[in-house]
Amino acid sequence: MDDATFLDDVADALAGLPGVAAVALGGSRAQGTCRHDSDWDLAIYYRDGFDPATLRAIGWPGEVSELGGWGGGVFNGGAWLHIDGRPVDVHYRDLNVVEHELSEARAGRFRIEPLLFHLAGIPSYLVVGELAIAQVLRGELPRPDYPEALRRSAPQVWWGNAERIFEYARANHARHGRLAACTGLVTVAASQAAHAILAARGEWVTNEKTLLDRAGLAELDELVAVARPTPASLKHLVDDARTLARGSLDAATG
């Protein structure tokens, strides 16, 4: 089965589930940056409830979570499936939540939530960014621009977090030569800074896979690679990483 037929069949099946109002394709497939082996990222948008048992009943092999099964918050669960030889991720998206976060983002407000596999956590406006890049396959969804209020507020929040983490790493781990703890915190701080940089540019972030590269912070790999478990080396790491991040943020803010 070719990709177009595959996607059409899967979209039809998802759109037919009770409560589903729209189905969208996201991720690299939607943006045209995918590899041949990239996952297919799909989202089902529902209002006033969705029963994952109806998705499970289709019979596709894989794991189907309950609502909230991926930690709750805006990223409220989904499924990892294997359909016709292709890896497919299905995300649950509550339209009431999405519309609320869109309103909040337009006012420059957001929060940061923890999520497995994400160093910096995710901004609540992630679900708004998904709308901006998605290809709507079934139903209708808004396609928001990046709000100016969010461009002003988000860099301050993300960079403020990054600054505090850089300082904590230097004061509490670098001076003791704690390599693992210090490099870990520096990487988290750089990820927070990357969010600040991309927010200042008005670029949506929907995952961390290429976050550092997109923000101009790929050099962090080299800084971490040469770090050693000595106070001098780790203080250099923190200072150099912060300087790198600050320079990229200054360039983004003009």
Image (cartoon, rainbow, N blue to C red):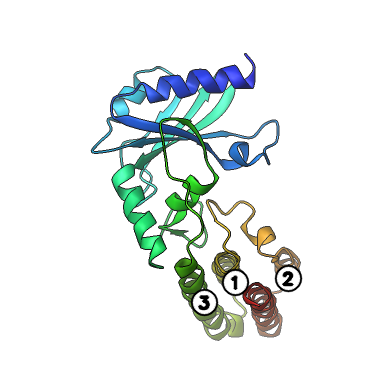
Residues 144 and 25: in front is 144
- In the rendered structure, find residue 223 and report the number of the disc placed on it: 2
- In the rendered structure, find residue 186 and report the number of the disc placed on it: 1
- First in residue order: circle 2 vs circle 3: 3
* Mark 1 → mark 2, Cα distance in angstroms: 10 Å
**Which quadrant is the N terminus positioned in?**
top right
Q: Measured from the top left, where is residue 207 in percent x and y? A: 54, 51
| Residue located at (45% from left, 69% from top) | 149
Quick one: SS at disc 3? helix
| Residue located at (54% from left, 55% from top) | 205
Residues 184 and 33: in front is 33
Answer yes or no: is residue 56 visible: yes
Q: Could you tell me the amino acid type at mark 3?
A: Ile
Q: Measured from the top left, where is residue 241 in percent x and y? A: 67, 75
Quick one: SS at disc 1? helix
Q: Measured from the top left, where is residue 164 in percent x and y? A: 50, 80
Q: Measured from the top left, where is residue 190 in percent x and y? A: 60, 69
Quick one: SS at disc 2? helix
Asked whether, in this view, residue 182 is left or right of residue 214, the answer is: left
* Dots 1, 2 in contact, CB < 8 A: yes
Residues 235 and 191: in front is 191
* Dots 1, 3 in contact, CB < 8 A: yes
- In the rendered structure, find residue 165 and report the number of the disc placed on it: 3
- In the rendered structure, find residue 203 and report the number of the disc placed on it: none
